[in-house]
Image: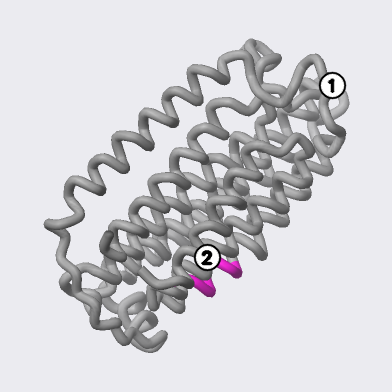
Amino acid sequence: MSFMFWILAALTIAGGLAAVLLKNLVHCALAVTVAFAGLALLFLQLDAQFAGFAQILVYIGAVAILVVFAILLTRGSETPKKEIGVFSRTWLAGLVVAAALFAVLSWAVLQSAGGLSQDDAAPTVSVLQIGQALMGRYVLPLEIVALLLTAATIGAVIVAMHEKEDSK
Amino acid sequence: MTPLAGYLLVAALLFAIGLAGALTRRNAILVLIGIELMLNAANLNLIAFWRYGPHPEALTGMMFAIFSIAVAAAEAAVGLGLVISIYRHAQTTDLDQMNRMKG
């Protein structure tokens, strides 16, 4: 367990907690960006350079920007009124479910930790190998993902398009 | 504690935080942020298992994580488009007030 891992883990968890707990939605979006950046650094710490940089490009570059746009378009930046609060009526049940899930997952991880193989040699994977795998063995999933992204983009535009005035 | 267990614990905690956010917040955009956190926690698991697994040169976990990132981006686009569409229709993103399927 390196010292760097604990710093990055603390940064990521703090970003995630702040994203869930803060009241102002714009602050939440910034906090979740911190969590995404922490995760990208954890990927780099795991010698997965390509996935780390893809995480930075996709999440910080695209998803965080999309979230900020959606918040501003829906006027979510206004802090909600004090008496309503930011949590739903059934927040206690949700919290119990999440805590129970974490308890089960961490119990499972700690129980099985000894049986997991520990290969400490860092794998040397170049971007060339990743590209060749994407063009060779994984070419069909790559094409399907391309189709999915096209369909999702068109679908998102159609869903969010202006309704016709006479249909109201 | 082994390094792999550390990464798995961080991913489990992040998944629980995302689940708590998705289940307890009343704003639809915050629910989407919680879902993104959960997807990211799963990606961290995939990458950690790839790094400490027996055959990292096969690239399986890395590829799964990359495809998962692509699918998550598509999910975010469609989800936020839906939120904006609902906001235009109902003038709210409060999930407690969205309790009718009739338009």
Q: Which sits in the foreground, B43 or B88? A: B43
The answer to if A52 sits in the magenta stretch is yes
Give the residue at x 28% y 82%.
A123
Q: Which residues are magenta?
A: A51-57
Colour pattern: one colour
Quadrant where the N terminus of chain B lies?
A: bottom left
Disc 1 crowd rating (10 Å Cα; few below 14, some 14-19, many 20+) is: few
Give the residue at x 29% y 71%.
B51
Q: Position of residue B100 (x, y in %)?
A: 64, 11
Same-subunit check for callouts 2 and 1: yes
Under mark 2, the amino acid is Ile
Callout 1: residue from which chain? A
Q: Position of residue B70 (x, y in %)?
A: 49, 59
What element does badge 1 sit on?
loop
Determine the CA span between mark 2 and mark 1.
Answer: 36 Å
Q: Position of residue A152 (x, y in %)?
A: 56, 49
Left or right relative to A40: residue A128: left
The answer to if A108 sits in the magenta stretch is no
Give the residue at x 31% y 40%.
A105
Q: Which sits in the foreground, A119 or B87? A: A119
Tag shown at residue A81: 1
Disc 2 crowd rating (10 Å Cα; few below 14, some 14-19, many 20+) is: few
Left or right relative to A117: residue A1: right
Q: Quadrant of residue A163?
A: top right
Give the residue at x 86% y 22%.
A166
Under mark 1, the amino acid is Lys
Left or right relative to B42: residue B72: right
The residue wearing badge 2 is A7
What element does badge 2 sit on?
helix
Q: Quadrant of residue A45?
A: bottom left
In this view, A164 is above or below A32: above
Contact? badges 2 and 1 (CB < 8 Å): no
